[in-house]
Every structure is written in structure tokens, then in C-alpha cells.
Image: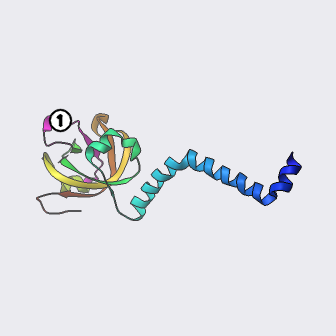
């Protein structure tokens, strides 16, 4: 049977078919991971954050883990709480994402009351922040802009 196939198709055709099948199987198995890695690399290399809502990032942080993202929400920055929240209601403090700010950023943006902000940073999946209360964190935070106030990087 092998001689018949070799003589009928030729070795090159068999090689092309085998390689094509291997590539198709590889793309089916690894395709979703390649797309995610492409989004991570392009967001970092192009220095262009992926725009997402705070709710999307809270609901599925594993989907955006390692990605350079930009989000808008209500920020609170003080000694024990550095978070971007869904609402300005301080009673809903747990509905947010931890901001891993350095000491200089904390000193610059020290405001204990919620203020509307846009934050750019790399999302990290996993419980984070003070006492591990938040589902993810932005670390490092590249830029934090307080709306209605002077812009500071």
C-alpha cells in the first residue's frame, strides 16, 4: 500500500499533506493562547493600553493577566487603600482593583475620598492589596490621571 501511495502522490505531496495537518492541529490547540499573547505583546510594545472597564477586569482578571490596560473608575489613594472602584460609594470598597502605587505616587495622589480617575498599568491576576481583598491589581501603574484636577504622571 505504501508503494502505491508513494508512486501515486509522490514524496513531496505526502510531505506537504503531513506538514499541513500538523500545522492545522497546532493552530487549533494553541490558537487562543497565541491570540492572548499577541494582545499582551502588542499592548506593551506599542505602548498602547487595551481599553477595558473595571467590571470586565474584575470579572475575568485571568483573561487580561499581564496585559497593559487602561480603565476609568473612582480612585481612593491613602495609606492603607489604593484602589480603583466601580462606584464612588465608599460602602462598596470591595468592588474594585488594587493599585500597586510606589511611595512617590502615593504621596502625589493622597486623597481618601473617591475621585474620578483614569489609570494605565499592567494587570496582575490574583488576590491583592491590603489583606488580599481585591481580585487583581495593576502593577506597575504607569499613569494615574485625576479628572477635574491637575494632571500628574
On the rendered image, what quadrant is the C terminus found in?
bottom left
Residue 99 on the magenta span: yes
Residue 28 in view here: yes
Q: Quick one: which residue is furthest to the right in this view?
A: 3
Q: How is the image coloured?
A: rainbow
| Residue 137, x across and y down, in percent | 32, 45
Residue 57 in percent (x, y) is at: 32, 44
- The magenta region covers 86-103
Q: Give residue 19's position: percent from left, percent from top.
A: 70, 54
Kindly indicate the quadrant of the structure image that contains residue 96.
Answer: top left
- Residue 18, magenta (yes or no): no
Task: Judge by depth and name the residue closer to the eye, 82 or 50.
Answer: 50
Q: Residue at x 45, y 58 (%)?
A: 41
Q: Nearer the viewer, residue 47 or 109?
A: 47
Q: Is residue 128 visible?
A: no
How many numbered marks does the figure carry?
A: 1
SS category of the residue bearing label 1: helix
Decide which of 41, 98 is in the foreground and name it: 41
The percent coordinates of residue 152 (x first, y second) are 20, 62
The residue most toward the bottom is 46
At horizontal 30% and vertical 51% (from top left) the residue drawn is 52
The residue singled out by tag 1 in the image is 92
Location of residue 28 with respect to 135 vertically, above or below:
below
In which quadrant of the rendered view does residue 1 lie? top right
Category of crowding for the residue at label 1, using alpha-carbon neighbours closer than 10 angstroms: few (below 14), some (14–19), many (at least 20): few
- What residue is drawn where x is 39% and y is 52%? 67
Amino acid at each position: 500500500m505504501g508503494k502505491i501511495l508513494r508512486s501515486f502522490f509522490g514524496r513531496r505531496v505526502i510531505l506537504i499533506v503531513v506538514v499541513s495537518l500538523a500545522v492545522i492541529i497546532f493552530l487549533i490547540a494553541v490558537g487562543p493562547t497565541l491570540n492572548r499573547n499577541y494582545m499582551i505583546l502588542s499592548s506593551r510594545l506599542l505602548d498602547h493600553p487595551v481599553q477595558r472597564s473595571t467590571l470586565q477586569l474584575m470579572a475575568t482578571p485571568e483573561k487580561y493577566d499581564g496585559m497593559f490596560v487602561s480603565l476609568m473608575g473612582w480612585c481612593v489613594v491613602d495609606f492603607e487603600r489604593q484602589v480603583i472602584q466601580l462606584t464612588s460609594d465608599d460602602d462598596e470598597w470591595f468592588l474594585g482593583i488594587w493599585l500597586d502605587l510606589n511611595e512617590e505616587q502615593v504621596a502625589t495622589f493622597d486623597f481618601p475620598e473617591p475621585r474620578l480617575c483614569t489609570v494605565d498599568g499592567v494587570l496582575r491576576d490574583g488576590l491583592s492589596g491590603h489583606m488580599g481583598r481585591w481580585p487583581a491589581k495593576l502593577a506597575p501603574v504607569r499613569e494615574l490621571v485625576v479628572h477635574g484636577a491637575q494632571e500628574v504622571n
